[in-house]
Image: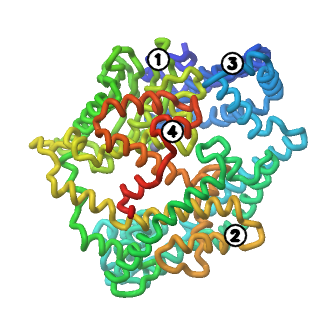
């Protein structure tokens, strides 16, 4: 019996093998196709659409997960073999003409018109999504849409390759040791190893993140910094890896696609089902924050020039900022580690949110997992004892596991009808060494809280429609439940529960706590302007660029006001900006979401701030009005129901020390 064929709450991770993957997915694709056909004939195709892929979804999420945390060459090969078939199947659904007709017919029936609440929203969203995928186009329109999608996929793939190749094509070999002054020993060793790997003498610097950041932050020699900075900011802007033409082509194709589907521009297409709804609203949002950040931004830059005692060039900023930071705060992140033993952080977190949200989290031992280091837990409602969901936690790096931290769902249940949810959280946190427990940085503790927030969004969901449950919400809303959790990592009362010295049990000393808070506010306006600038240029390119002005010159003009020093004529950061151009959509027209979500989380947290960071009353409301609701209602409505008003950026400005 193939363990991937049936949805099982007790996922048999101890039995799944690479040989199961292809036969299971092939069979489930046949099954799903039959269910699509059945949906076409169903008098209520909407309900059928919600469930017709559930077995396939489950098997694919288990396979994707094993590939992420316990892969082998055979497993990866099996995963890669089923990926294209699965994505071809999913993208065929909104283009299935029979299903589209059945759906429209149903919408016109008495039953369809009488739908209310979540089901009504599901019908509207499904119809809109079919339309955005071209369901309503005539044959010529559909054919053109397909051509555009193919061309976009090719152009964005090539864009990403050019960035990678241009990055790798550049190096700087330094042979005079005197020129390395200022670099920390770890960066010198890294540069030496990079040279050795190429059988070169001296020290080799590249445009890879760690090398570039070390040079820009620490290297005393301004000439070398300039050389590296210029190389980085003209990547893929000329020669064989030139991305200028591709960028223009990608923008034109996206605009044509948007127009074909009835939208003003690509931002309106992408944002149609997001909380911001239109490109114009996202632009206004950024403009407002920019106005509120600019004064402090100018002050920070004046302070930095006064500190350096000279006019600064773009390649001087990071370097002098680091000198200023060291002069203002003698704060070392590492000093906090002994206060963050992982087990204590996790049990403290369960205690805090158990109290606030009215849940109980208990470790269980009877669920098979993919590695002995994995722990399993169940979440119950504290009042009724009912089983809401279970989850796996896998915290440490392994060779067969991918990098980063993430949350994923395996089963979207319906706890109201006795079917609990199932999910997981993973990280690559500092493992235990030398007989000590795992001692985390403060940032790592925040990461655990962040992923646990996504997980709670899934496990506490009370939405009947599977497609609208849990974390299946708008892209610019999904980080609210995760980011809000990080706020507790900065509250004294909460920290005292989760951060205790692993040997003495002492809380974080007050002076260390104060230093940690002050260091956070350092050059916050510059950090914010940088993010706002990327959001600005992204929306400007997708809404205002007219195809006449050179695309790189246009982007440079947009970015200048957000940059601490005047940028040179050939500045072309944009030709290396993979967020926007390395996939057909990606962060294209969506970069603003980073700030959008920060505004939401900082603002929503003010209720806990005012009414108590452990307030059960606010916690209950937060659980009922946000976490339980998934995408069952417009996120702006959910937000208003919790806050009693629209989001206000003031809390973000205050948190960053930028208010008033
Ligand atoms: Zn997240």
Mark 3–mark 1 Cα distance, whole angstroms, equals 20 Å
Residue 323 versus residue 488: which sits nearer the camera? 488
Chain-order first, disc 1 or disc 4: 1
Q: Secondary structure at mark 4?
A: helix
Q: Secondary structure at mark 3?
A: helix
Measuring 26% from the left and 71% from the top, which residue is drawn there?
A: 326
Work out whether residue 373 or residue 642 is closer to the camera in this orientation and state it.
642
Residue at the bottom extreme, as displayed:
310
Q: Earlier in the sequence, mark 2 or mark 4?
A: 2
For the residue labelled by badge 1, is the local secondary structure a helix, a strand or a loop? helix
Q: Is residue 66 visible?
A: no
Counting other residues with Cα less than 10 Å from the Cα at mark 3, is it few (<14), some (14-19), or many (20 or more)?
A: some
Quadrant of res 238 = bottom right
- Residue at screen point 54% across, 13% down: 1
Of the image marks 3 and 2, the number of the one nearer the N terminus: 3
- The answer to whether marks 3 and 2 mark residues whose Cβ atoms lie closer than 8 Å is no
Q: Earlier in the sequence, mark 1 or mark 2?
A: 1
Compared to residue 92, the image places residue 140 above or below, namely: below
Q: Residues within 10 Å of mark 2 (few under 14, many from 20)?
A: many
**Residue bearing mark 4:** 640
Q: Residues within 10 Å of mark 1 (few under 14, many from 20)?
A: some
Location of mark 1 (residue): 415
Q: Which residue is mark 3?
A: 48
Question: In the rendered view, does 646 fall on the left or right side of 548?
Answer: left
């Amino acid at each position: 019996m193939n363990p991937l064929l049936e949805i099982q709450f007790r996922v048999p991770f101890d039995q799944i093998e690479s040989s199961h993957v292809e036969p299971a997915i092939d069979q489930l694709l046949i099954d799903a196709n039959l269910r699509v056909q059945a949906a076409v004939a169903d008098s209520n195709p909407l309900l059928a659409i919600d469930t017709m892929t559930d077995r396939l979804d489950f098997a694919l999420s288990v396979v994707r997960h094993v590939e992420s945390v316990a892969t082998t060459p055979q497993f990866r090969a099996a995963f890669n073999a089923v990926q294209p078939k699965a994505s071809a199947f999913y993208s065929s659904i909104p283009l299935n003409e029979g299903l589209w007709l059945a759906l429209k017919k149903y919408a016109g029936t008495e039953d369809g018109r009488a739908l209310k609440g979540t089901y009504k929203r599901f019908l509207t969203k499904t119809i809109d999504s079919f339309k955005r995928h071209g369901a309503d186009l005539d044959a010529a329109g559909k054919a053109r849409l397909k051509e555009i999608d193919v061309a976009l996929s090719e152009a964005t793939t090539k864009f990403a390759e050019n960035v990678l190749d241009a990055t790798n094509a550049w190096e700087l070999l330094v042979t005079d040791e005197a020129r390395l002054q200022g670099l920390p020993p770890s960066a010198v060793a890294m540069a030496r190893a990079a040279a050795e790997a190429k059988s070169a003498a001296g020290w080799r610097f590249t445009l890879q993140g760690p090398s570039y950041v070390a040079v820009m932050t620490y290297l005393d020699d301004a000439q070398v910094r300039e050389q590296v900075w210029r190389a980085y900011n003209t990547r893929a802007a000329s020669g064989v890896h030139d991305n200028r033409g591709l960028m223009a082509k990608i923008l034109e194709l996206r605009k044509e696609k948007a127009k074909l589907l009835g939208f003003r521009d690509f931002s309106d297409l992408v944002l149609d089902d997001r909380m911001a709804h239109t490109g114009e609203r996202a632009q206004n949002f950024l403009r407002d924050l920019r106005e509120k950040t600019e004064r402090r931004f100018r002050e920070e830059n004046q302070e930095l020039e006064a500190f350096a005692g000279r006019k600064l060039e773009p390649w001087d900023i990071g370097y002098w900022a680091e000198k200023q930071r060291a002069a203002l705060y003698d704060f070392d992140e590492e000093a906090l580690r002994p206060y963050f033993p992982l087990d204590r952080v996790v049990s403290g977190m369960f205690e805090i949110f158990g109290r606030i949200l009215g849940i109980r989290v208990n470790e269980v031992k009877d669920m098979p997992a993919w590695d002995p280091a994995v722990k399993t837990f169940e979440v119950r409602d504290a009042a009724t004892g009912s089983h809401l969901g279970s989850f796996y936690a896998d915290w440490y790096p392994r060779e067969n596991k991918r990098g980063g931290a993430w949350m994923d769902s395996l089963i979207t249940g319906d706890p109201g009808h006795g079917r609990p949810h199932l999910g997981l959280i993973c990280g690559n946190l500092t493992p235990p060494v030398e007989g000590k427990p795992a001692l985390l940085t403060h940032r790592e503790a925040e990461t655990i809280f962040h992923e646990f927030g996504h997980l709670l969004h899934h496990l506490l969901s009370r939405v009947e429609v599977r497609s609208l449950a849990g974390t299946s919400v708008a892209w610019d809303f999904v980080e609210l439940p995760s980011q809000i959790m990080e706020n507790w990592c900065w509250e004294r009362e909460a920290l005292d529960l989760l951060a205790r010295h692993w040997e003495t049990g002492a809380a974080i000393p007050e002076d260390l706590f104060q230093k940690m808070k002050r260091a956070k506010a350092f050059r916050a306006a510059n950090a914010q302007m940088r993010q706002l600038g990327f959001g600005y240029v992204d929306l400007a390119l997708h809404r205002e660029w007219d195809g006449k002005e050179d695309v790189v010159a246009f982007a440079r003009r947009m970015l200048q006001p957000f940059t601490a020093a005047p940028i040179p004529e050939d500045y072309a950061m944009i030709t290396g900006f993979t967020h926007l151009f390395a996939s057909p959509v990606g962060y294209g027209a969506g970069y603003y979401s980073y700030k959008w979500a920060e505004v939401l989380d900082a603002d929503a947290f003010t209720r806990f701030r005012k009414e108590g960071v452990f307030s059960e009353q606010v916690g209950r409301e937060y659980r009922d009005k946000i976490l339980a609701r998934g995408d069952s209602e417009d996120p702006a409505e959910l937000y208003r129901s919790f806050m009693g008003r629209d989001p206000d950026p003031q809390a973000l400005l205050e948190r960053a020390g930028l208010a008033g």
